[in-house]
Image (cartoon, grey):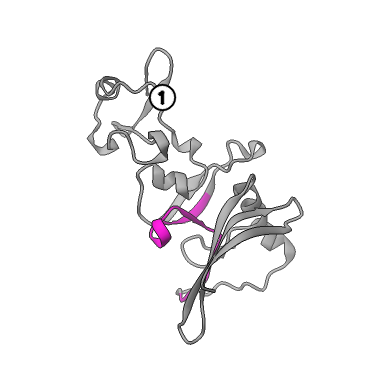
């Protein structure tokens, strides 16, 4: 069931609760979705802009802006028009540097170690377990960063020393050539 004004969709009923997922300036939900029980509360809020449905969330920064602030697996819909309607499961880091990071590779001490010695096709499509060790896939990364995005590398040496590098501009070409610029960090 959809709650509407006469011009625009405002929110959607999910399990008897209206979910609000959009806020001006991409900040926080207009009204916490846990507190909404019927359309009258939304209509009384005087909002005329639509609430973003899950299908409009393009990356983890938009997941964070929708009010979800726990790290974990989320479903997003990448930006490229040719992938419209094709959801992608990603791991969102909601703690590092303000949160909202879409993790493209994760390595660590997990019960099952992922073999990263793979062929080109595996790196193109992605592999591993999204809740543990994985590579998201070159094509998925290219689509996510179409038009540019910011990338952060977290590094840890064998001795435990940590560092990071942030590039304010990151894209992949259709042949997966990396284009990065505007570095900051300590690595």
Residue 78 in the image: state x and y as whole percent. 57, 43
Q: Nearer the viewer, residue 154 or 132?
A: 154
Q: Is residue 106 magenta?
A: yes
Given residues 8 and 170, the one toward you in this image is 170
Q: Is residue 100 above or below residue 50?
A: below
**In this rendering, is residue 139 above or below 184?**
above
Q: Quadrant of residue 169?
A: bottom right
Residue assigned mark 1:
49
Q: Helix or strand or loop: what does disc 1 sit on?
A: loop
Q: Is residue 150 magenta?
A: no
State left or right for residue 35 relative to residue 74: left
- Percent of width and height locating residue 6: 40, 12
Write down the region rendered in magenta. Answer: 89-109
The image shows residue 131 at horizontal and vertical percentages of 46, 62
Quadrant placement of the C terminus: bottom right
72 left or right, relative to 120: left
Taking depth in this image into account, of 131 and 41 the one nearest to the observer is: 41
Categorize mark 1 by other alpha carbons within 10 Å: few (<14), some (14-19), many (20+): some
Query: Residue lying furthest top in this view?
Result: 6
Where, by quadrant of the figure, is residue 177 drawn?
bottom right
Counting from the top left corner in percent of width and height, residue 145 is at 61, 49
Query: Could you tell me which quadrant the N terminus lies in?
Result: top left
């Amino acid at each position: 069931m959809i709650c509407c004004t006469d011009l625009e969709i405002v929110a959607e009923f999910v399990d008897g609760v209206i979910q609000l997922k959009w806020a001006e300036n991409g900040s926080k939900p207009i009204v916490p979705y846990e507190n909404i029980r019927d359309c009258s509360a939304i209509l009384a809020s005087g909002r005329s802009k639509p609430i973003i449905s899950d299908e409009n969330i393009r990356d983890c920064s938009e997941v964070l802006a929708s009010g979800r602030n726990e790290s974990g697996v989320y479903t997003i819909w990448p930006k490229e028009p040719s992938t419209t309607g094709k959801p992608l499961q990603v791991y969102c880091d909601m703690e590092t540097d303000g949160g909202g990071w879409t993790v493209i590779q994760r390595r660590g001490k997990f019960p099952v170690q992922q073999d990263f010695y793979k062929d080109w096709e595996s790196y193109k499509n992605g592999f591993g377990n999204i809740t543990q060790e994985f590579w998201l896939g070159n094509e998925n990364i290219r689509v996510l960063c179409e038009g540019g995005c910011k990338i952060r590398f977290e590094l840890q040496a064998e001795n435990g020393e940590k560092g990071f590098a942030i590039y304010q501009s990151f894209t992949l070409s259709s042949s997966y050539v990396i284009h990065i610029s505007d570095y900051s960090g300590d690595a």
